[in-house]
Amino acid sequence: MTDEPLFPLTGTWSPIEAAPAVDTPLGRITLSASLGGWSTDAAAAEACRNERGSRVSRWESPVGRMELLLCRPEATLPEGMAVSDCWAGLWRVSPHSDVESCEFQARWEAGYGWSGGGPDSGQGLGAQTWADDRFEVTIGTQDGETILAQGQSGPRSPERLGLGGGASLRRCGMRGPRSIRARRLADSTPVFASV
């Protein structure tokens, strides 16, 4: 990556051509974002992958720059629970000037395998769950109240990673959650997770 990426990369990274997505036992979930009237639905300007499978995608536009880091964090779960895979997604946004909106989306690709689903939120969590007869996949993020409280408490990351250069986000909304968890329904043992 060039021009001081929003995510500083260490180690060996190789260029790739891949859409930002997470594969689950019930199908593929594609991730996208929009900044003002511009969207990441276009191909990333750059994308790379490291030896552990982490991926960074970067988009440039007249409105600003966006990067998505998809990686495999170490999952810490309560006793008796297990995970076979874990993915996390983190967006970084750097607008070139003031923008009115910033949205993040997670969408099922055609051919998904779930047969039903619905809301599955909790305290501080906005979530949706889908299931078939073997697996359950939950996608979630912090709820609106928690996001608002964090926004009002001030920046939570270094300025160069977020809103540097005098630009600001007047309204940053979540549209579609960003963490994914799946568990086998027969024995309630998690088999896939993303935070």
Image: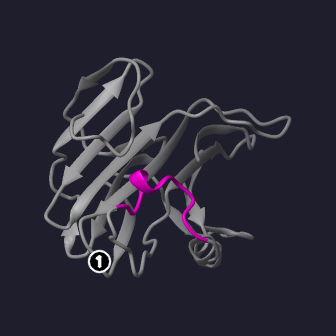
Q: How many marks?
A: 1
- Would residue 62 appear left or right of 7 to someone viewing this image? left
Residue 110 visible in the current orientation: no
Whole-percent x and y of residue 14?
A: 26, 22
Q: Please identify the dominant SS of the magenta region.
A: loop
The residue identified by callout 1 is 99
Whole-percent x and y of residue 83?
A: 66, 33
Name the secondary structure under disc 1: loop
36 and 114: which is toward the camera: 36
Q: Inspect the magenta stretch and tell me whether residue 85 lies in it.
A: no
Residue 40 visible in the current orientation: yes
Whole-percent x and y of residue 50?
A: 37, 23
Question: Which residue does the image show at 58% across and 34% down from the upper left?
Answer: 73
25 and 165: which is toward the camera: 165
62 and 80: which is toward the camera: 62
Q: Quadrant of residue 110?
A: bottom left
Query: Furthest residue to the right?
Result: 79
Question: Which residue does the image show at 40% across and 46% down from the upper left?
Answer: 27
Q: Residues within 10 Å of mark 1 (few under 14, many from 20)?
A: some
Query: Furthest residue to the front?
Result: 166
Give the residues in magenta. 154-164
Question: Which residue does the image show at 72% across and 38% down from the upper left?
Answer: 189
Question: Which residue does the image show at 61% across and 29% down from the upper left?
Answer: 84
Whole-percent x and y of residue 34?
A: 28, 67
Three-letter residue code for mark 1: Val
Quarter of the figure with the N terminus: top left
